Amino acid sequence: MPRITVTVDGITYEEEVEPRLLLVHLLRDRLGKTGTPIGCDTGNCGACTVMLDGRSAKSCSVLAVQADECDVVTIEGLGRNGGLHPMQRAFHSEHALQCGYCTPGMIMAAIDLLRDTPDPSDEAIREGLEGNLCRCTGYSNIVRAVRRGAREMSGETPATTPGPASATTSGPASGEEVRTS
Amino acid sequence: MIPAAFDYIRPASLDEACHVLRDADASGNDVKVIAGGQSLLPLLRLRLAYPAALVDLGRLPGLRGVEDRGDHVFIGALTTHDEVLRSPAVREHVPLVALATATVADPAVRHRGTFGGSLAHADPAGDLPAVAVALDCVFIARSAEGEREIPAAEFFADYLETTLRPGEVLIGVRVPKLGAGWGFHYEKFTRTAQAWAIVGVAAAVRTEDGSIAEARIGLTNMGSTPLRARAAEEALRGLSTAHGDSGVTIPGRVHDPVRDACGQAAEGASPPSDLHARPDYRAHLARVLTYRAVRAAGS
């Protein structure tokens, strides 16, 4: 069996993998990264989106062997110092989830979008998230959350934000917002 | 679903890849080439394909990138859709490629999926094959015997089939620059965002003094291969672009002859029937979308 080296959320793993093992199965079943859900069989829904060498990819459409020597960041690797990433906080404050199944993928796709477009219009957000489906159809709040996340990531504190949440990418979040699952 | 088991081979060089593919063919092994895998992996997961082995070309050096080569732009087969979209040479000299690529799937898929992979996959519902036939691109294939040029018109053999020979690898595509006076548009009709085209039209139009001097029209998903709408191209030649219309007949208003010419867009096509559309509806779409694409390209 092929042996691969892959870094996931900052930790380097050496794994022997069957060639047909999908990256998402490696993440979930072997490494315990169950924050990345599996939504569909066809690469449509985007729920399993992760960062692969810095850009978004659907981990159900990548073989684990293809990720050899790559750097993977999942939803579990976004937070710093036990706090949430600003985009996670924004989804929380804007109520941008109902069942929450699409949320990890939405957040990864949103962060990817902001790399090229730090201050996206609503239209650009909808385009940027076109590969991610929310079957609760809560798109309006998702778009609002991405806008808020963009403001927070650019260092601007939204006027409507109550509380002490820090507005920098690397800063720790306020204690009450920390969630572990 | 989990794909059926297969062996995995990652050649270190193009030569090695060609030899692996030739040996597999000689021994009757069913192998598939994988690059970005964005079309192949869903097929494997649905078990619509179950090759004995995958040959992963994804990391081969030298097949990735865009080069401006004077009269054409060379796009390496492993260039991702995302890289194509970021390429100044593509945007400036072969904008039709950028227009169609921007409609391919979604950003995450465009980060992984490759230009050459989409073409070699030869899905007639894919957006790039129609662009390749419209622009008369030249495909460069490499085998253990050497390099071979394949004109776009001869590259697509049938549904998901190309004229690449066993042991041949698509290494890149020459996209001709059409020069001054040309306008471009890709018009795609989909039911939902990121879906495959129900029908798509790639149009390149050269106008001269308010008339269409030359038009090239490629059709997506109007048959088992991408097609040229030759009858419409011929009918468009020489027509004035002055009279755009909305398709609604208004007494006293000049009818747009360009619309009549585009009415021949589906001539000779055998569009497929599926969940989304019957052949007659696809033919209707081809006519309407060709008009939109030609108007947008030729204005």
Image (cartoon, rainbow, N blue to C red):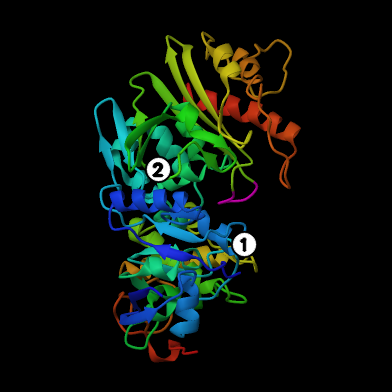
Chain containing the residue with disc 2 = B
State which tag comes first along the sequence, 2 or 1: 1
Image quarter (top left, top right, bottom left or bottom right) of the N terminus of chain B: bottom right
The answer to whether residue B32 is left or right of residue B243 is: left
Q: In which quarter of the image is residue B273?
A: top right
Examine the rendered structure and indicate whether residue A137 appears above or below residue B123.
below
The answer to whether residue A11 is left or right of residue B297 is: left
Circles 2 and 1: CB atoms closer than 8 Å: no
Answer few, some or many: residues within 10 Å of disc 1's Cα (few below 14, many 20 plus, some between 14 and 19).
some
Answer few, some or many: residues within 10 Å of disc 2's Cα (few below 14, many 20 plus, some between 14 and 19).
many
Residue nearest the observer in this picture, B53 or B268: B53
- Range of magenta residues: B191-195
Residue sitting at x 75%, y 38%: B278
Residue sitting at x 26%, y 38%: B67
Q: How far apart are marks 2 and 1 (CA)?
A: 26 Å
Residue A86 visible to an observer of this rendering: yes
- Say if the magenta span includes residue A140: no
Q: Position of residue B77 (x, y in %)?
A: 36, 45
Residue nearest the observer in this picture, A36 or B150: B150
Residue B46 badge? 1
Q: What element carries label 2?
A: loop
What amino acid does circle 1 point to?
Leu
Q: Where is residue B62 in the image (x, y as percent from the top left)?
A: 26, 48
Q: Where is residue B289 in the image (x, y as percent from the top left)?
A: 61, 30
Residue sitting at x 62%, y 12%: B257
Please tell me whether mark 2 or mark 1 is closer to you in this view: 2
Chain containing the residue with disc 1 = B
Question: Which residue is label 2 attached to?
Answer: B168
What amino acid does circle 2 point to?
Glu
